[in-house]
């Protein structure tokens, strides 16, 4: 009886492996790609956070605008650092642990002291929400609803000068929640909004997590309904209206605090400067890139001052334009997709969540060189 030949050939008594086909490669690749995409979006959602939606936070208000038709202050923020717009949910302090006033300096509340969000510290005609005094419900847009120790809502005090950068002493606590686990769209009820004589104010939001020292912050510009509207003029100013509220920093006549064509004044550690102000220091002229007080020009490569002239003139040369605008990379900082940092003289952008991965250390790493 002859042996029946099987369809599976043998070599040395071992069955051959299944034949690799193009369709199998495509199917396997599709499964792997799908898993990677799901993992990427899961990480992005876990790394995202939130902002007030009503009244709308500065960053979210700017993000919601048409990029081709932005309001002047939002356009200013986009020009300074695009991450101030697109990372609208990420104004945070990873090491807050309730030490908000200790960690965030006056004049830097709206940015939480983070350089990429520094444009939000500049006073100006930011998008605002009309708000009515009395008991109100605030709405929050939380892209990652973390377990919460508390949320605090502050409002600027009556008579606050809207032409000044926000300071802690400007604020009055109007509501604090207890601990809870929020939803993606969270409504906080029973917030008693006080009456104000002047119209322009800020609602300041602090969100402290209970499962981490991390906290989040936001400034919401509001117009108080029923306010007489006549007390927004800074003390000591006349009624000529020439306080430049609607002009983004640096878009005025010359941004020089010397006035009427005078040379810039000498830098003073006790003086407050905003974007565009110029001073002289150690034989050079310096221009402020954002709100600053007590930071000596040239004391830090990443500080608020940009050198515009070595001789005290106004030729605008030098200026360090080749220095990256992004924050320096920090191995202890957490970054998410789209965040930009500077490292070794170049600007790098994160493609996904990362912590401790040095930019440029691997061609397959999370960082992509953009400048």
Image (cartoon, rainbow, N blue to C red):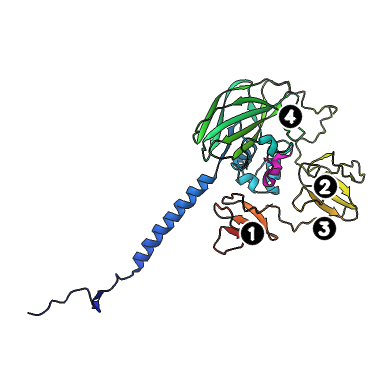
Q: Are marks 1 and 3 in contact (CB under 8 Å)?
A: no
Q: Which residue is mark 2?
A: 296
| CA separation in Å, label 4 and label 1 | 40 Å
Magenta stretch: give its range: 109-122
Residue where numbered disc 1 is placed: 370
* Quadrant into which the C terminus falls: bottom right
Q: Please tell me which of labels 1 and 2 falls first in the chain.
A: 2
Callout 2: helix, strand or loop?
Answer: loop
- Left or right of 103? Residue 239 is right
- Which tag is nearer the camera, tag 3 or tag 2? 2
Contact? badges 1 and 2 (CB < 8 Å): no
- Disc 1, SS: loop
Crowding at mark 4 (Cα within 10 Å: few <14, some 14-19, many 20+): few
Mark 4 lies on residue: 169
Per the image, label 4 sits on a secondary structure element best described as helix
Picture coordinates of residue 307 (x, y %)? 82, 53
Disc nearer the start of the sequence (3/2): 2
In the depicted view, which residue is nearer to us: 319 or 47?
47
Q: CA distance from mark 3 to mark 2?
A: 18 Å
Q: CA distance from mark 1 to mark 2?
A: 30 Å
Read off the residue under disc 3: 318
At a point 25% along the width and 75% down the height, the residue shown is 14
């Amino acid at each position: 009886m002859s042996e029946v030949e099987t369809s599976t050939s043998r070599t040395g008594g071992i069955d051959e492996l299944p034949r690799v086909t193009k369709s199998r490669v495509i199917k396997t690749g599709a499964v792997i790609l799908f898993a990677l995409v799901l993992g990427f979006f899961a990480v992005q959602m876990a790394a995202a956070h939130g902002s007030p939606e009503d009244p709308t936070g500065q960053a979210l208000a700017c993000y919601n605008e048409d990029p081709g038709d932005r309001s002047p202050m939002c356009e200013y923020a986009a020009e300074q650092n695009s991450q101030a717009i697109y990372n609208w949910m990420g104004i945070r302090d990873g090491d807050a642990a309730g030490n908000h006033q200790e960690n965030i300096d006056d004049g830097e509340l709206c940015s939480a002291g983070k350089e990429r969000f520094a444009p939000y510290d500049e006073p100006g005609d930011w998008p605002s929400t009309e708000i009515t005094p009395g008991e109100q419900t605030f709405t929050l847009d939380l892209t990652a609803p973390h377990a919460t120790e508390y949320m605090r809502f502050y409002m600027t005090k009556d008579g606050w000068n809207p032409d000044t950068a926000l300071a802690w002493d400007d604020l009055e606590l109007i509501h604090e929640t207890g601990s809870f686990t929020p939803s993606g769209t969270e409504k906080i009820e029973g917030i008693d909004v006080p009456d104000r004589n002047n119209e322009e104010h800020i609602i300041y939001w602090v969100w402290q997590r209970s499962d981490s020292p991390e906290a989040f912050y936001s400034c919401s510009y509001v117009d108080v309904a029923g306010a007489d509207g006549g007390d927004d003029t800074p003390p000591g100013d006349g009624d000529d209206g020439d306080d430049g509220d609607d002009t983004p920093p640096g878009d005025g006549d010359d941004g020089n605090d010397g006035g009427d064509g005078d040379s810039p004044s000498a830098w003073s550690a006790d003086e407050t400067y905003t974007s565009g102000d110029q001073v002289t220091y150690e034989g050079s002229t310096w221009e402020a890139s954002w709100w600053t007080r007590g930071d000596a020009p040239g004391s830090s490569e990443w500080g608020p001052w940009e050198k515009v002239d070595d001789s005290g003139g106004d030729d605008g040369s030098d200026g360090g334009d080749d220095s990256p605008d992004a924050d320096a990379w920090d191995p202890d900082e957490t970054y998410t997709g789209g965040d930009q940092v500077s490292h070794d003289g170049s600007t790098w952008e994160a493609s996904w969540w990362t912590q401790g991965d040095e930019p440029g250390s691997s061609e397959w790493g999370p960082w992509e060189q953009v400048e």
